[in-house]
Image: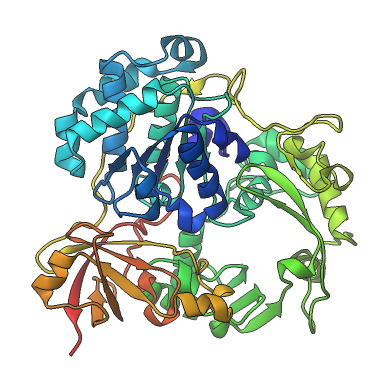
Amino acid sequence: MAGLAASFGSGAMTNSITDLGQSDCFLITGSNTTENHPVIATVVKRAITQRGAKLILADPRNIELAKFATVHLRQKPGTDIAWINGLINIIIDEDLLDSKFVSERTENFEAVKEAVKKYTPEYVESITSIPGEDLIEAARLYAKAGAASILYAMGITQHITGTDAVKSLANLAMITGNIGKPGTGVNPLRGQNNVQGACDMGCLPGNFTAYLQVANEEHRRKFEDAWGVELNPNPGLTIPRIIEGAGAGTIKALLVMGENPMMSDPDLSHVEHCLSKLDLLVVQDIFLNETALLADVVLPSCTWAEKEGTFTNTERRVQMVRKAVSAPGEARNDWEILKLLANKMGAGWKYATAKDVMDEINNVTASYKGITYERIGKTGIQWPCPTLDHPGTPILHGITFTRGKGLFSVTEYVPAAEQTDEQFPFVLTTGRILYQYHTATMSRRSLGLVSRTPEAFVEIHPSDAKELGIKPGDEIEVSSRRGSITLKADVGKRVEKGVVFIPFHYSEAAVNRLTIAALDPVADIPEYKVCAVKLRKCA
């Protein structure tokens, strides 16, 4: 989000899901789209099989989408900026750029042009292991396409250079003029159904709604006038900083809502230590997850089927959620719980329904001003929608960027925070699988889903397995400098030699006991996708 916001002025998917079907070429990176966003993957596959669209897939693993790829760039984990800058260098060198778009609609191009000169195919191959000829083919495919679309997900952002990697993708789109038109754009695929909506509503430590800045006096005054209170001018803390604050004793109480840090945060032993230092831990959730088991108080909330309101999905579409069944026991809507807590502390909030909350959103959020319950209907509306007669915006940045001109940003390859060595010779990367969802608070309570993927596993290349005497199904201990877990070996060529993959859904083999809490300096996102580990066959 931070990378796109810096480049374009808006940290959101530029195009629409159905619009992707008009792409002539897809660049998909950091996204196992078939398993994590299967509906979007279907749109992509139809474009390939029915219209002849091309797919450039950049992924260290041989995922299902590789079968549809014209070229598969199997980069070493943590080297994304190198190969993206390599594409840009080839496009400039072969004069495949859209000079008119660059001249009229962007700024700072010359600085990027100079910076990427060293990213020759040979230099990129030395960093990423991507053959130079594959890189050249990918650059030509993307630049020569009539309409080329970039799709990315957390495989790009969950690195210490995640923000810069997104800026690099934005550079690539701008240099070819693939912005503001059907079938183009830079399209982040969000990890949950309302990640976009939560960010839109200011669930970021430095933002109010619509990404207005807490530290900006003019922005702050707008919300002070609307809410009738004086607001703190200092941005809040990100999740990693909150955990550190708990451990240091500067944070005494913590409310965790719809989150499971005892599964989702890196270096879980450290997280558990920090949470144990709190005077009060309150968890608001629908199930007793791993974090709730540590809580002093658990507040039961509603599932999606038990409440009304809106979600804003990955394409900026605001959609209605309609209550289907009543919540059991004492479970309440999340907004009701927050209202009750706030009013116990003297806030005097007067919301009576979810619609009351939406009415306030309309009043204080310019991009949502025309998105009312009455207008959303069955299909929803995509923001920005500034007036009640505005139809919504399927494609962003058509005439001008949100920030005026698109900003080219100089980015450089930086090695991952933790490198392999003799003691820890394997690179671990993590991710999701089709039949489980995030920390599996919900999905592992479904017997049907559990039957498809009943236990944790580690993917190992056959050469590595042979060298270690490991056979498929063997119990393996995987250790990092932070902890160890035990799980079964899945031997195959989905991973390259020297790389192992573990999904993060299984509490009995929680891979985040191994991951490192190294952070992107801009977004404070941990480097979940690269750390060093060793393997040992259990007796």
Q: Is residue 446 visible?
A: yes
Residue 528 figure quarter: bottom left
345 vs 449, left or right, is right
Q: Residue at x 77, y 44 (%)?
A: 224
Q: Residue at x 22, y 68 (%)?
A: 533
In the rendered image, residue 499, in percent from the top left (x then y), is placed at: 22, 60
Q: Residue at x 51, y 63 (%)?
A: 242
Q: Residue at x 58, y 57 (%)?
A: 192
Instruction: Please give the count of numbered marks on the rendered protein.
Output: 0
Q: Quadrant of the C terminus?
A: bottom left
Residue 72 figure quarter: top left
483 vs 334, left or right, is left
Q: Nearer the viewer, residue 341 or 462?
A: 462
Q: Nearer the viewer, residue 438 or 49?
A: 49
397 vs 455, left or right, is right
In the rendered image, residue 367, in percent from the top left (x then y), is placed at: 73, 36
56 vs 363, left or right, is left
